Amino acid sequence: MGEEANCNVAMEAKLPKENGLNGHTGIMFNDITPLLLRPGVFKDAVDIFVERYRGMGIAAVAGIEARGFIFGPAIALAIGAKFIPLRKPKKLPGEVISETYVLEYGTDCLQMHVGAIEPGERVLIVDDLVATGGTLCAAIRLLERAGADVAECACLIGLPKFKDFYKLNGKPVYVLVESREYEK
Ligand SMILES: O=P(O)(O)OC[C@H]1O[C@H](OP(=O)(O)OP(=O)(O)O)[C@H](O)[C@@H]1O
Ligand SMILES: Nc1ncnc2[nH]cnc12
């Protein structure tokens, strides 16, 4: 991804103190939307994942709401896998299983439709960003409870300050760029 360095700068935007994130201040919000305005860079990012995961027997790509829904389906289509949305509570209409988790600025819950994955199917989990790893960990737990074989987690951005502490049940996480660190 030739424009990787510039893109990383563009993805970072300092939030105002009144950022609505449960009153927390000093969080550097990493925004991937500028990348989406540049089709060449967007495609390069998807292609890197596609090259990595094609031919690996991935039956399903599970995308995490909301920003995992931007990248997950494109990767799934390109590698010939089904797409499974992991959604926030009360969004999926059918029977669900749920996992709650803690993240950098609060708590949340992910749900998946019962029957979305067959036991033994190999799955890739996709999101835009890994910070504490709490969200990915909840996704791994959901899928493993349903009998899935989680191959890897893939994110565009990783926050280096958390990377020694990821709790991903031993599963690897692959990131395209590490976000810059900023002081408050
Ligand atoms: O590694 P973690 O500490 O768990 O944080 C990473 C998660 O945080 C963001 O989503 P957010 O929870 O803000 O939800 P949203 O995409 O629905 O806004 C991001 O898109 C990841 O899903
Ligand atoms: N710093 C951050 N920027 C964007 N999304 C996040 N999710 C958790 N921490 C985040």
Image (cartoon, grey):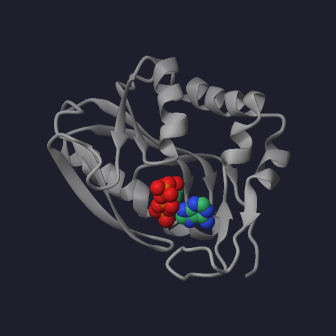
Q: Give residue 55's position: percent from left, percent from top.
A: 47, 18
Of the 4 image quadrants, the one containing the C terminus is bottom right
Q: Give residue 158's position: percent from left, percent from top.
A: 61, 56
Q: Left or right? Give the position of 47 relative to 20.
A: right
Residue nearest the viewer, comparing 36 with 130? 36
Residue drawn where x is 29% and y is 37% of the image: 149
Of the 4 image quadrants, the one containing the N terminus is top right
- Say which quarter of the image contains residue 88: bottom left
Q: Left or right? Give the position of 123 relative to 112.
A: right
Residue drawn where x is 39% and y is 26% of the image: 58
Q: Left or right? Give the position of 120 relative to 129.
A: left
Residue 55 visible in this rendered orientation of the protein:
no
Q: Give residue 130's position: percent from left, percent from top.
A: 54, 57
Residue 34 visible in this rendered orientation of the protein:
yes
- Say which quarter of the image contains residue 94: top left
Residue nearest the viewer, comparing 158 with 36? 36
